[in-house]
Image (tube, grey):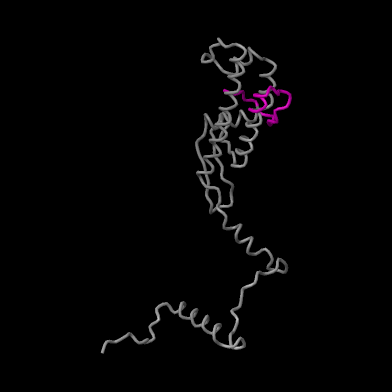
Amino acid sequence: MEDRGVATGNYGDSALFSTILHLLARRFAPAAWVRPIPVPRHRHSCGPNAGRATNMADNLAPQPNMRDLMAAVAYVLLHWGWLEAEIRERIESIEPDRQLFKGSLWGHWRSVEPEACQGVQSDIQTLADIRNCLAHGLCGARADARTAGEPHVVCHTSAGHRLFTMSELERAADALHVARNNVRDGRFDRLGGETGGNDRPS
């Protein structure tokens, strides 16, 4: 006679089998016989352990790496390029035939709009200093998530090595963005750039 496959106890996944038994019990057994499955509750946000899970999640957040640091460097240089592009457009709108490829762009602007150029240069001296260091003296970088120090780059200058942290680079890029918008809109009274430093844009 053909064996019809009487159950022998091999039910495959034990977890699935337990779930099936539980459902059958809920369907056919009296309610008093069925033990409810406990549902985990969220802990209240008070007491000595309050915020512990959140703090652990914060600690697991990705830390800035070398790629992030290099992106901050690139943003400073890119925003500087955008600032000079706005200056170039202003010069060309005033003197379309001026040969800007000869000499310094800032020198051309000083000849065309001396007061505007002087106001911008006096407002962004520190930003120009940072840009010049990155463009002409970048020689090192460090971004190690295993250490507590902030990612930074190192630039060689005539006065020795200078260090710029990632947060300093981000602030410089933001300030250059403001300066570019003000040059585009013709606002030269207050560009929002940091003051200080002695280097002129090169």
Horizontal and vertical percent position of residue 173:
61, 35
Spot the residue most to the bottom. Answer: 1
Question: 172 and 45: which one is in front?
Answer: 45
Residue 3 position (above or below residue 63)? below
Horizontal and vertical percent position of residue 3:
29, 87
Would you say residue 93 sits in the magenta stretch? no
Horizontal and vertical percent position of residue 82:
57, 27
Q: Quadrant of the N terminus?
A: bottom left
Would you say residue 185 sits in the magenta stretch? yes
Residue 197 position (above or below residue 36)? above
Q: Quadrant of residue 167?
A: top right
Point 50% across, 78% down: residue: 19
What span is colored magenta in the figure? 180-202
Point 63% across, 27% down: residue: 180
Q: Is residue 105 left or right of residue 46?
A: left
Spot the residue most to the top. Answer: 97
Question: 37 and 61: which one is in front?
Answer: 37
Q: Is residue 18 left or right of residue 174?
A: left
Horizontal and vertical percent position of residue 106:
60, 18
Residue 146 position (above or below residue 129)? below
Query: In the rendered picture of this protein, how many numbered marks are placed on residues?
Result: 0
Spot the residue most to the front. Answer: 1
